[in-house]
Amino acid sequence: ASLCWLTAMQSVPTVEPGEPMLRASRGSRALRIAPMLALLVGAGLFFSRPAEPPPSDIKLAIGKPFVQGIISLFDMKVDNILLQKPESQWSHFAVGMLAFDLLIDIHMELLFFGAQATLASAEIDLLFRGQRFGTLSTRPCPLGGGGKIKTQMAGQLVVDQLDVFQKIARAVVHEDEFTVELFSVVTVELRGTDNGCILRKDMCKTIGSARIPGVTFAKSVVLKGAQGFSVEMGALKLIDLPATEPAGKALISVDAKVTNPSSFELHDLDVFSIDIYTDDSWPKTERPAAESLGVKFAEVNTEAGFSLGKGESEWFAVQGFLSVPEREYDLVKTADVLNHFLTSRPTPLIASIAGSSQPFFSAAAKGAALRAFLPGMKHDFGGDTNIVVRAYIDLDVPVAVASLLNPLTGTTLHQYLYVALSNPFDATLYVCGLEAEVMFNGAHVGQVSLPQLTLEQAIVLPPSERGFLTPNAYPIELHATELPSLLQLLHDIAPQPAGKGVAYVDLNARIHARVGGAEPILVYRQVNVSAQLKQFSGLP
């Protein structure tokens, strides 16, 4: 037995703080377990003595080498880490540190202690890729009597190395998995049958109690990352806000949900502030999202009390305002977002975390960037998202045809038309100008333009307005560069029975607008715009 004790004491591995901890192979693990088995045999011979030993002898029998061997051999697996705000964190925040409560669900397989074991309260150093970032102050953690166990480790994480903490936060957000190292010198408490051991009889063969200080606790745990959280966005909504001046800001609202496959359950996130950018690297996304921020499109916030569990979340709302710098490049990029939206195409965006009302999460997440797609607008009204929906041309068809066929009168007709406009947004739309190429059966047949208007002169379309007829007529030029197509257009708009009474054209339009406090130039095709003669339309 003495030889067994000596062998076990000589074979106990030691790990210094910050030293990499490699997982043992099956062969090396067997070599490490062999002396422990010999140690257990020695302990069994001791406990088979006829005389019941006093607690002091128990302490000598189950000494530090025995406990150190068991603690060193087991692998700790983390199932879940619940983060929630402590009762008070401001005392740490005041001195440049961060604090948050953790509840860690773990499972492990240990050799049997022969008593009920508890890992006493400890100060555990936490390291990420060899760099320390904080301390986990734990409460007592029950280890049972050994074997396969599931337990919980509760405590408070205090972060004092912010730069390293931000590195591990990025790993949580973006990586598939990563490793965190734990190091401490702890105390293990053992209780026998007469001191509260409530395990099975065969697991409580000892009596008395023992407190084993100075046990090295050094573990590497593999944690799952969120892999970008897989953000899914719902439809964009713009809602007018009360304003003392025309064309004020509108509330922007987007529903979202995320998938969290990580080891972390994030409670008490509270209010998260998010800046939404265009994706400057699209369609090539080799660059990380944080390095691909284009033009800031909007500033939004989550609702108070926001939390994020594991797996797929429920839909939640983020709300805020359009926030576009008054530069032409930025206005064009913002218009691209709205153009994609209006033509029912998904738009690549990047959500960049600006901060949180919780200092812990603000420090962890600030600057983290997540890719997402904003879906296009659904065709809820009339099957399209046109702003220009109908055109009424003031034209005499026989005179126009004769003019086009006469080589002396030129190839351009100058006429006037009224247009009916719709507003596909849920906020007031101000139309300040329009230029459009008129296409019929794929051929260019004309050009129409509305003059540039000031905000006071703009055509005001209330939310979801359908078919607002402009009070004034605007010039249109009909070009005979594609004469057969233009003649067919004139034939179709002629009243029945000579023609169909209506034709459908497409407009490659540039619409100068103001909506939600921004002034984008909306450049997108207005499809299937009906064109007919004003004098046969019933208009005055």
Image (spheres, grey):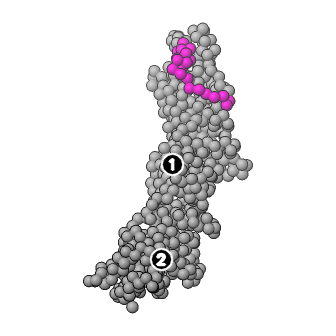
- Callout 1 secondary element: loop
Q: Nearer the viewer, residue 207 or 367?
A: 367
* Picture residue at 45% right of the left edge, 49% below the top: 312
Q: Is residue 37 left or right of residue 138?
A: left
Q: Position of residue 524 (x, y in %)?
A: 48, 68
Q: Nearer the viewer, residue 91 or 374?
A: 374
* Quarter of the image where one finds residue 384: bottom left
* Picture residue at 47% right of the left edge, 54% below the top: 232
Q: Name the residue furthest left.
A: 497
On whether residue 473 falls in the magenta region, the answer is no
- Tell which tag, 2 or 1, sits nearer the viewer: 2
Mark sitting earlier along the chain (2/1): 1
On whether residue 22 falls in the magenta region, the answer is yes
Q: Position of residue 211 (x, y in %)?
A: 62, 26
> In this rendering, is residue 487 above or below 128?
below
* Quarter of the image where one finds residue 488: bottom left
Query: Marks 2 and 1, Cα distance to the nearest angstrom?
Result: 48 Å
Q: Name the residue furthest bottom.
A: 540
- What kind of residue is marked 2? Gln
Q: Nearer the viewer, residue 121 or 537?
A: 537
Residue 447 image label: 2
Q: Which residue is mark 1?
A: 229
- What kind of residue is marked 1? Phe
Q: Report the predominant secondary structure element of the magenta stretch.
A: helix
* Picture residue at 63% right of the left edge, 14% below the top: 10
Q: Position of residue 126 (x, y in %)?
A: 64, 36
Visible residue check, residue 273: no
The magenta segment: 17-39
- Callout 2 secondary element: strand
